Image (cartoon, coloured by chain):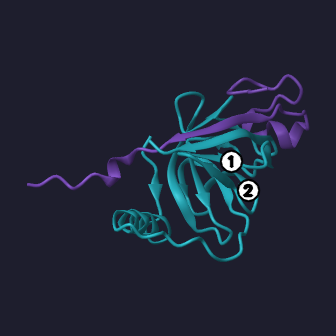
Amino acid sequence: MTVTYATATVKTPRMQVMADVIASRTPAAATGTATAGQLVIGTASLSGGTGVLATIALPATAFTVSGAVATLQGVPLSATASASGTAALAEFRNNAGTTVISGLTVGTSGSDINLNSTSITSGQTVTITSGTITHG
Amino acid sequence: MTMGDTKCPHCDGTTQEHAPSCGTLLPPIEGTIDIIEDLDELKPEPQP
């Protein structure tokens, strides 16, 4: 699946790492204090606060990276659905609600996020039991 | 319980109004994240 990364905060640093490694330089380590981001599951019209079905809080350090795989921490992660609808898209957002990764597909199989049902009812518990992002 | 357009046997409501009006517990939605990055975005732009 094609997902979209935020340009200034992800694409540019990623390209800088590539440029530095080609030049035999050592990429700079991350700085700052980790704050909890969120996984937002929504309808096909998900954009900002529109189409939000469930917002799942992530651990402050949401992923650990080993080799080419980033593994979601703290699973299972749950939230109570805030609206009813058919889940179709999802986004990772930072603590301020700024979208970091968008375009994640949600379905029952073969999607970036696979749920046992995409029909979500307000008040229903939505749980993510595992998560990985693999560098292709 | 996924109601779809089926009437709830308890409150006769539809999916949209089932949970708040009836209070019947709905089973959790469970899922996994499995993203394999598509690196096409890193390929050079095709020349005209």
Q: Decide: marks 2, 1 in contact (CB < 8 A)?
A: yes
Chain label for disc 2: A
The spot of residue A44 in percent (x, y) is 52, 46
Chain label for disc 1: A
The residue at 67%/52% (across/down) is A64
Report the chain shown in purple. B
Report the chain shown in cyan. A
Where is A21 relative to A51, above or below? below
Where is B24 relative to A81, above or below? above
- How far apart are labels 2 and 1 at the CA level? 9 Å
Q: Secondary structure at mark 1?
A: strand
**Residue B29 circle label:** none
The residue at 87%/41% (across/down) is B21
Q: Secondary structure at mark 2?
A: loop
The amino acid at mark 2 is: Leu
Q: Residues within 10 Å of mark 1 (few under 14, many from 20)?
A: many
Residue A122, image quadrant? top right
Q: Residue tagged by mark 2?
A: A58
The spot of residue A69 in percent (x, y) is 57, 44
Where is A126 relative to A97, above or below? above
The amino acid at mark 1 is: Leu
For marks 2 and 1, the one nearer the N-term is 2
Q: Residue tagged by mark 1?
A: A72
The total of numbered circles placed on residues is 2
